[in-house]
Image (cartoon, rainbow, N blue to C red):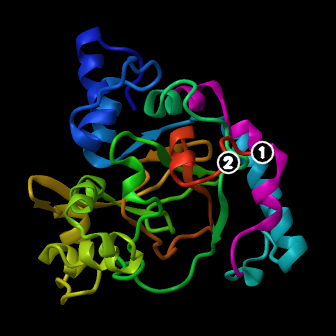
Amino acid sequence: MPRGRSNASAAAGASDLLRGAVILETDPLSSQPSTLTPADVQRFGDDGYVVVRQAFSRDDALAMEDRWWSELEASYGIRRDDRATWRQIPGDLKRAKHDAIQSRILTARVQGVIDDLLGAGAWAPPRDWGRAIVTFPEPGAWDVPTGLWHWDSPCAVHMDALNGLLVVSFIGRVAPRSGGTLVLAGSHRLLMRQERTLTPAQRGDAAVRRDCFHRSHPWLKALTGKASSPADRIAAFMETGTDVEGVPLRVVELTGEPGDMVFCHPTIVHCVSPNRGERPRFMRIRQQLLARTGRRLLGQPRDPR
């Protein structure tokens, strides 16, 4: 991915996207990005996510992976070197979620990315880096799912400014078709528009909000199972995509190497996907890494403890 800085005018234009095109197109950041490039910020504004390769050490990620395997063996009898023991586990890993080794994820580069997106001093390090998710491979064909398309953070919290992130951390390698989370690039922009059109009753019902979005366009209805599917869902939703009210939409599979991270707009629509690969998916997902303003709007304590 491109690294380094560009000229000041380009950086200033890119900064506008963080609070501007993503939210209301009227509230640019006062500081310039220092870790992300203008192209990175453009991607975040347009698509709702930015990929940062080797955001933290590959060696640290692999050390975490070793501990996850140890927990799988101790808690479930699942051994790395014996595929006959591999099976889906109920829920997420418990010990891994709170393991102190995860503090190594917060490198200077990671802090710089979050500073660029939320603002320096506007957030506090999270208590943990989210769910410790393991998805073992299963037989069958891979396809784009119809169910479980959702978003995790209320749009209202981010209407006036970007007040949080959804953060994905790769603990192990996740290859294509191997269980990587699917995100709907561009969806955050449509959700912000939808939020302004909903009635108070609709805003108060998460199921109604999801249904309104799923049924808002024929392409979205087909994606989410509300209408008949095209013959080739991969081609229709991942390769071709569509345009809704001037916003390009396309399903993107998050893949990566140990130490990679993806920083997403907190209202990006996403979905679990099947693992048809050769190895389990080891991934952390912090569903809401909130700025202090976001925590206040949600009635949460100021800083995690």
Are there few (<14), some (14-19), or many (20+) residues within 10 Å of tag 1? few
Q: How many marks?
A: 2
| Residue drawn at 52 percent across, 85 percent down | 139
258 versus 98 height, above or below: above
Q: Name, please, the residue furthest toward the front.
A: 200
| Residue drawn at 23 percent across, 58 percent down | 196
| Residue drawn at 56 percent across, 46 percent down | 296
Q: Nearer the viewer, mark 2 or mark 1?
A: 2
Q: Is residue 172 left or right of residue 14?
A: right
Q: Name, please, the residue furthest toward the right.
A: 74
Residue 95 is one of the magenta-drawn residues: yes
Label 2 with label 1: CB-CB less than 8 Å: yes
154 versus 81 height, above or below: above
Q: Position of residue 299 (x, y in %)?
A: 58, 54
Residue 120 is one of the magenta-drawn residues: no
The magenta span reads 90-112
Q: In the rendered structure, which amino acid carries the disc numbered 1?
A: Arg
Disc 1, SS? loop
Task: Give me the C-alpha separation between circle 2 and circle 1.
Answer: 9 Å
> Residue tagged by mark 2?
301
Are there few (<14), some (14-19), or many (20+) residues within 10 Å of tag 2? few
Q: Name, please, the residue furthest toward the top.
A: 8
Q: Position of residue 73 (x, y in %)?
A: 86, 72
> Residue tagged by mark 1?
305
- Prevalent SS, magenta region: helix
Q: Nearer the viewer, residue 252 or 248?
A: 248
| Residue drawn at 40 percent across, 83 percent down | 141
Q: Is residue 281 left or right of residue 16?
A: right
Q: Quadrant of the C terminus?
A: top right
